[in-house]
Image: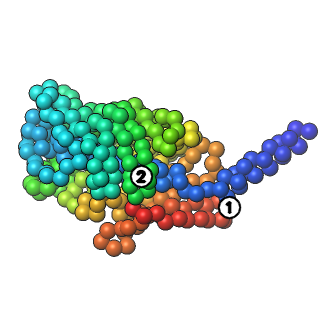
Amino acid sequence: MKIFWLWMMLILMGCTSRRQFNAETGDDAVLIHVLQHECMRLLNDVQRTVSEEFKIRGKYLQDTLREYQKDTSALKNGLVRLKYLNLNFKGHKISGDLVIEQTGSLKWKERNAKLIVYFKALQIQNLVSGLQFNLNGTVELTNISGGTWFEVEYLNLSEMRYTVKSNELNWQSGGGAAQNLNINMVVWRNYDSQRIGGLAETENNTKLQFWGKLPSGTDFFQRTLEEPVYRLNCDYHWVLGKTEIQRANYDYSLITHYELTSSCATSYIIEWSRKQQSHAISKNL
């Protein structure tokens, strides 16, 4: 009798997995791609802002393109506030506040300097995908190489590296409940591009970048297969790399490819496979 029920359980599990695979759309991978894309844009705003403020970084760097108002009234306390204006700017709109806090005595250009970034009721609309996000919480940045964007762009520094860590982010999308989001990655910046890699290590999975819960409540993690590369002259888009998303109670993963076919890629590919069956979709950047 026990063998019979075990056999029935295995059949049911196989049917559930097959139904999941047949119904798969790749939307979860699109969601995480766009979320990561928007988070990197926010971090770029942080790096640009810090490079402008002498008291935080040590050198002024002028940039006239804005989608936010900068409040430096608390700069003497190491704080800068960016108020996003909900403008249509390079394919997205953002409202809400982002606050940058210098912690400790080190300026950002010094190795081991730290910044705390507060996302305060940020509402992000990605106009290409139509997806919308709400972000709240804190992120910690650590300069692990020394230098800033200024040295890379103007003083011939070959590369600047910093880590991004958080286990205190909440995100919401599509009217679902707010869910936890964890980030643990390293960002390399050279003159014309950035690339990212995962830092977190678990018993079975290394190089995790993002993990937490999807809006549906399903646990997920994203890991690096080939470090994604983001080219600065390609309108804030990834052009190379490969990542994998795994979800709880799914027996297959979603693979996202960023493949450069011209000077700037215009799309990316999501694929999934199970028992010699494969599907793929292409999405515009």
Label 1 neighbour load within 10 Å: few <14, some 14-19, many 20+: few
Q: Is residue 164 above or below residue 14?
A: above
Residue at image coords 21%, 34%: 81
Residue at image coords 65%, 65%: 277
Disc 1 element: loop
The nearer-to-camera label among 2 and 1 is 2
On the picture, is 279 further left or further right than 62? right
Q: Amino acid at mark 1?
A: Lys
- Quadrant in the picture for the N terminus: top right
Return the mark for residue 59: none
**Image quadrant in which you'd find residue 136:** top left
Q: Position of residue 19 (x, y in %)?
A: 70, 54
Q: Earlier in the sequence, mark 2 or mark 1?
A: 2
Residue at image coords 26%, 42%: 84
Residue at image coords 35%, 49%: 38
Q: Position of residue 27 (x, y in %)?
A: 53, 54
Q: Position of residue 60 (x, y in %)?
A: 8, 45
Name the residue beneath numbered marker 1: 275
Q: Position of residue 76 (x, y in %)?
A: 11, 27
Return the mark for residue 34: 2
